[in-house]
Image (cartoon, helix red, strand yellow):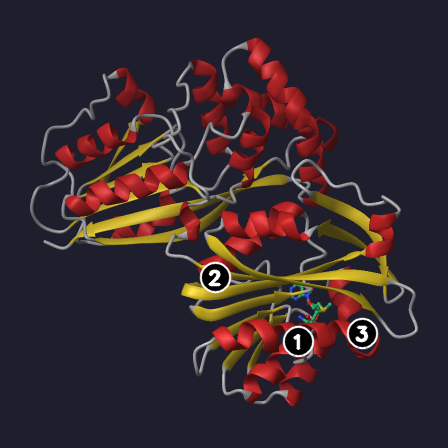
Amino acid sequence: MSQHEETYNRSVTEWETHAVESINHVRDVLKDHVSPLLPPNAMILDVGCGPGEPAASYFSNLGHRITGLDFAQSVIDIARARVPNAEFIKTDILAWKPTGEYDLVLASHCMYNFPFEQIRSLVFKYTNCAKEGGLVVVGSSTRVELLEKGEIQFDVKGWAEGVQNVFLGHTFRSTYALADTWRRLLESTGLEFMKLDQRVVQHPGSTERNLASFLIMRKTAKNPLLGPYPWPETLPKPLPSGSSTWVAWQNVLKRMKSDVEMVGDVIRDDKYKKILYIGIGIEGMAKWDNVEYLDLQEYIKNDTVIPFPNDTFDAIIAWGTLSFCPSQAFVQEILRVLITTGPACVILHEGAPDNEFINLLKDGAGNKLLHPGILLAQVEETLKKAGFADTAYSETESFLNLADIVEDRRVEFALELLAAITNDQQDVQKSVKANLIEPLKKHFMGRPMEIAYQGVILTAKRAT
Ligand SMILES: C[S@@+](CC[C@H](N)C(=O)[O-])C[C@H]1O[C@@H](n2cnc3c(N)ncnc32)[C@H](O)[C@@H]1O
């Protein structure tokens, strides 16, 4: 059990007495701004729900269907007794995999203990499991006296991580951001801003003041997995395919779980007898009898022609390819080597908008370098026009494992890898490294042995 879980487990009653003004604020926000926007019988997900108050009991009395998530067993026990009509699941919200689609995803005062990277992943997860047109509501607060004394140092993106804070007599390290910063993050997942409700909350018998902010956002039609939004105005240029870039990517892939395994169902599906796998570095991958392997470098060297005749494969899996070659030409080549009639399938794996590795590259090399989301969306459209009407997106998570690198060398090792991926030229690599030292140090504080590689898979199927 983590120290945080234990603290919440022990302190639930104390917290309810202490936080009465905060609970009143949450209830007012739900009553004034959220409830009027919900359909009858709404499906609601209450993340970090606490002991059934204020959200679950309020919504349950209105006839809505609530699922509450919390990792503290004593909190879950109280919630179940108080709100018998609701469902409560004991889980860590980081580990939890969303299943349903919700009219409202509420995350009220429950994300202080996560570093920014995990907050970003969580927010994408919330938006992903909200229905189209549904609401995502996030509540957070910042200590006013720390703000007034200038003791919170926000980084260039507006986040302050690891701020020491005492909560119910326990020392926590908290992540803080002001409402504008939260709003930008929420918008980047494809949400539209509707309302901000702020109140300075002071708990009885305490001098501590907290600026509590609730952002009420609506999910617009965009798919969060194709973010971050807004999309770039022009398409990102393909990454340079020089030698250092390739070698570095191959080194990255060797340290991750075999990606063919992630789409193994297609390989095992006897509808698809002949499959082509295209990837950056295929050395050391699990080999399957029905799969041909093509290194993307061969495709590029070969004048961007897939070295197989027309009408050869009934499924194609391509991993991380769109960022390296003009994607429309690539998809035309895919379509050329696919069979022209009968069931066929295209699977494309790209980095997700919360991909830690790609976001580090963006921090070091400038924001416009990579945007797999917009490339995937364009390819999906082309595939649909070509008869691959059944399309779906799903998420994956791999890890770039750095446990074998001694701790003192980990930042340096990751710097070399990221700089080599960005550019062949020494002077550019030097400036990339300089930009990445602090972000990498911060990264390894939260996740000491690895860098997560969150992915999106587009599956496009043709039935006949
Ligand atoms: C300050 S309380 C807020 C409760 C309620 N949402 C509210 O706004 O009044 C934070 C809750 O989040 C839960 N929590 C914190 N971190 C969590 C995690 N990683 N997974 C699941 N629950 C978590 C705690 O157990 C606690 O019940």
Badge 2: few (under 14), some or many (20 or more) residues near its Cα, within 10 Å?
many
Marks 3 and 1, how far apart in space? 19 Å
Residue 288 showing in the rendered view:
no
Q: Is residue 41 above or below residue 242?
A: below
Of circles 3 and 2, the one toward us is: 2
User: Mark 1 = which residue?
Assistant: 28
Residue type, mark 3 in image: Trp
Queried on whether the Cβ of the residue with tag 3 lies below 8 angstroms from ligand 1, the answer reads yes
The N terminus lies in which quarter of the figure? bottom right
Q: Residue 43 location, x and y as percent? A: 46, 76
- The residue closer to the viewer here, 42 or 110, is 42
Question: Image quadrant of ligand 1?
Answer: bottom right
User: Mark 3 = which residue?
Assistant: 15
Q: Residue 104 location, x and y as percent? A: 50, 70
Question: Left of 423 or right of it: where is 431?
Answer: right
- Tell me where residue 58 sits by quadrant: bottom right
- The residue closer to the viewer here, 388 or 306, is 388
Residue type, mark 2 in image: Arg
**SS for dot 1:** helix
Question: Left of 203 or right of it: where is 315?
Answer: left
User: Mark 2 = which residue?
Assistant: 218
Of circles 3 and 1, the one toward us is: 1
Q: Residue 256 location, x and y as percent? A: 49, 38
Residue at 47%, 75% in the rendered image: 38
Residue 431 showing in the rendered view:
yes
Q: Earlier in the sequence, mark 2 or mark 1?
A: 1
Residues under numbered marks 3 and 2 in contact, where contact means CB atoms less than 8 Å apart: no
**SS for dot 3:** helix
Q: Earlier in the sequence, mark 3 or mark 1?
A: 3
Badge 1: few (under 14), some or many (20 or more) residues near its Cα, within 10 Å?
some
Residue at 59%, 52% in the rendered image: 183
